[in-house]
Image (cartoon, rainbow, N blue to C red):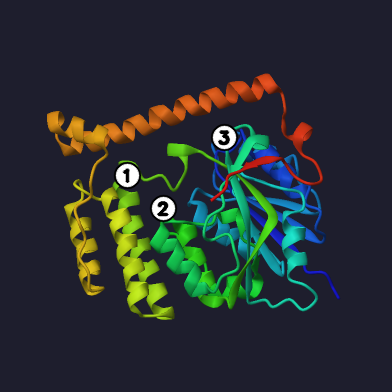
Amino acid sequence: MIKPLVSILIPSYNAEEWIADTLRSAVAQTWEPKEIIVVDDGSTDQTLAIARSFESPQLRVVTQKNQGAAASRNAAFALSKGDYIQYLDADDLMAPDKIAKQIEALGDSPSPRTLLSGSWGRFMYRHYRATFAPSALWCDLSPIEWLIRKMQLNLYMQTSSWLVSRELAEAAGPWDIRLLGDDDGEYFCRVLLACDRVQFVPEAKIYYRNSGPNCLSYIGDSDKKKVALLCSMELHIRYILSLEDSHRVREACLTYLQTWVSFFYPERADLVRRTDEIAESLGGKLQLPTLSWKAICIAAVFGRRRAKRAQVFLVRVKWAFERFWDKILFEIEGRGFKESFGKSGFPGQVLER
């Protein structure tokens, strides 16, 4: 049999601190044949120059005016020729055998309608201390069961953990450039609609850099991201109902709405009203979001809006401290990418469910 070509597609924007290690992990993939396509989205730092230093017949770098991650992924896909697509963010890492393990799991008679997922762990700087926390999505599932668990339990699969056949990618269509956040969640919903089953490959490991409030998916005080989030939520519900319109699915959708409405309340009453309308169309009713005990204390003195702003601020402070401390330990331990990357991938801490 002819071995399938795998396209590793990497959107990048102002990632000069991380892009070199990300590209090393792509080049180090044991699976052949492969092609690597980097689309620099108008970076203003040294990202493009660093990426171009890796150029080879196997690794291509292109640049475009800043349009966002979704547009960069669409551009990379348009240039690709692979039978399978591996999306990889510019600050994440793959174990050397990640792609090989997933392709091998398909067996001798692979179906292009099988969607492959894998395990992923979080880290900041010390990739060799990544924490892998198994969830209810870490198993073989039907598309409808996968979506129900995602929405009912507020779970997700990290973008780079997937390996998508070209047939599924073409059936799903392009990434939605309107979505400033959760564009990956919405995109892979469409991939799931097109697939026959999800096959989980635990040995296929991704190392996800926890960027905290700096990541694209972080909403914080951004009105644009709140509007985009509601758009993504409506699409999620439409997609899952197209697979199965049942009591259990509607209950999962209501739980999903209840989980995320807190991002709109109380600042965006219009978005809260729209969320309530969706809940009513599903036969349910949402409760007003509750605050943590710390926020309740702040709200009693300064009001709910200021309490929520304080929550956002405290998250940023906590994350900044954790990131600073992890960077110090990383420099003290002196274990860079080249020192810790072995054929079997990085070690990592696995948490029990």
Q: Is residue 176 visible?
A: no
Q: How much space separates mark 3 and mark 1, taking CA atoms?
A: 24 Å
Out of 75 and 110, give the one closest to the viewer: 110
Q: Which mark is residue 124?
A: 3
Please say if 193 is above or below 320.
below
In screen coordinates, is 16 left or right of 230?
Answer: right
- The residue type indicated by label 2 comes to Leu
Looking at the image, which residue sits at the far front?
A: 352
- The residue type indicated by label 1 comes to Ser
**To which residue does mark 2 refer?**
180
Quarter of the image that includes the N terminus: bottom right
In screen coordinates, is 152 left or right of 184?
Answer: left
Say which residue appears at 57% left-offset and 52% top-offset. Answer: 134
Q: In x, y percent, where is residue 104?
A: 78, 65
First in sequence: mark 2 vs mark 1 = 2
- The residue type indicated by label 3 comes to Met
Out of 105 and 61, give the one closest to the viewer: 105
Q: Quadrant of residue 121?
A: top right
Per the image, label 1 sits on a secondary structure element best described as loop
In screen coordinates, is 1 left or right of 204?
Answer: right
Q: How much space separates mark 3 and mark 2, taking CA atoms?
A: 23 Å
Say which residue appears at 24% left-offset and 62% top-offset. Answer: 275
Q: Evaluate if marks 2 and 1 touch, with contact meaning CB atoms under 8 Å apart.
A: yes
Say which residue appears at 53% left-offset and 61% top-offset. Answer: 137
Please say if 147 is above or below 334.
below
**To which residue does mark 1 refer?**
222
Please say if 259 is above or below 342.
below
Instruction: Give the class, few, some or many, for how many residues have Cα within 10 Å of label 1's Cα (few <14, many ≥20).
Output: few
Front tag of 3 and 1: 3
First in sequence: mark 3 vs mark 2 = 3
Q: How much space separates mark 2 and mark 1, taking CA atoms?
A: 10 Å
